[in-house]
Image: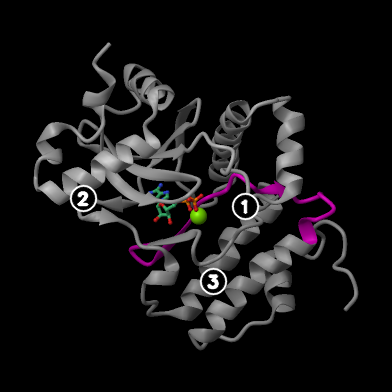
Amino acid sequence: MPRSVDLVFPRRERVEDRRKELSQRKLLDEYFDHGTLLAVSRLVSQGMFDVVDHPIAAGKEGGVFRASRGSELRALKIYRISNTTFRHLPPYAVEELRREASARNFGGLIFAWTRREHTILGRLADAGVRVPRPYGHFRNVLVMEFVGDAHGAAPRLKDTPVDDPADLYEQLVREFGRMVRTAKLVHADLSPYNTLYHDGQVVIIDVAQAIPADHPNARRLLERDLGNFARFLGRLGHEVTVEEFLAAVGGETVGSPAPEG
Ligand SMILES: Nc1ncnc2c1ncn2[C@@H]1O[C@H](COP(=O)(O)OP(=O)(O)O)[C@@H](O)[C@H]1O
Ligand SMILES: [Mg+2]
């Protein structure tokens, strides 16, 4: 087995300049604890990727890194093993997870969460929803398709100009329609933060908290998801109401009706 540490930010990239090296050191300490390095080298030995190139985004709950497999690029999402990782999750998600995983410790919960994101990405991809294709997972590390090109990762929708808001709306109706009607899932954390925009095409990410469309909370969460986009589209000059949006994606039959008021 290769030394795990050689698989992450290999030296040729690490020494480019001192500041970059220091910040990568910090990321190594923060995200690549012993167990994570073992998971990384296990995935490498399975042929999932050869090396972790550099960070794409670092958040409190985890980080996303670019990896390479020969000339092919991949993305790794690494969940941090800490008891703060689930602080931001809706209680229904954690509840369900505990049932699913019968996990008693945070490690087990996080591995189950990683597996869940892998499963949901697969289900969405199979339904024809544009998401990063999942390739594999081990412990707290998820391997998926890299969205972007050799110049960098695709920007989030919220960070990038949109030339044609009407076309964006059509794409969103198509993707959310497939999500709700074919995959029978509600994303439940959908916003222009969790949507990438690659060559004018939306790609939905960050799906672990998705819930079945027949869940009692599904209708309310779908309306919230669509509301985030209706506001965003409105700011771009494309007005749409949540009711219209809901009808367009075929979401009127989802879950229980929204409470009055
Ligand atoms: N498959 C991917 N390809 C390229 N960039 C990605 C990919 N997945 C995530 N990212 C980047 O990483 C960031 C965080 O990913 P996300 O899944 O939203 O994690 P978090 O749970 O931290 O919000 C995204 O905003 C995006 O910039
Ligand atoms: Mg996110």
The image quarter containing residue 252 is: bottom right
The residue at which mark 3 appears reads as 170
The residue indicated by pointer 1 is 88
Q: Give the x, y percent position of residue 183.
A: 66, 46
Residue 12 at x, y percent in the picture: 10, 35
How packed mark 2 is, by other alpha carbons closer than 10 Å (few <14, some 14-19, many 20 or more), is few
| First reached walking from the N terminus: tag 1 or tag 3 | 1
Horizontal side of residue 216 vs 69, given as left or right: right
User: Dot 2: what SS?
Assistant: loop
Q: Which element is circle 3 on?
A: helix
Please tell me which residue lies in front, 123 or 154: 154
Q: Disc 2 marks which residue?
A: 150
Q: In the image shown, does 129 or 43 lie closer to the viewer?
A: 43
Query: Which range of residues does the magenta coloring cover?
Result: 198-219
Please give the name of the residue rendered at 39% of the width and 23% of the height, measured from the top-left corner. Answer: 34
The answer to whether any part of residue 184 appears in the image is no
Give the vertical position of 245 relative to 32 (above or below).
Answer: below
Judge the density around disc 3: few (<14), some (14-19), many (≥20) Cα neighbours within 10 Å: few
Residue 232 against residue 89 in the figure, above or below: below
User: In the image, which is nearer the foreground, mark 1 or mark 3?
Assistant: 1
- CA gap, disc 1 and disc 3: 31 Å
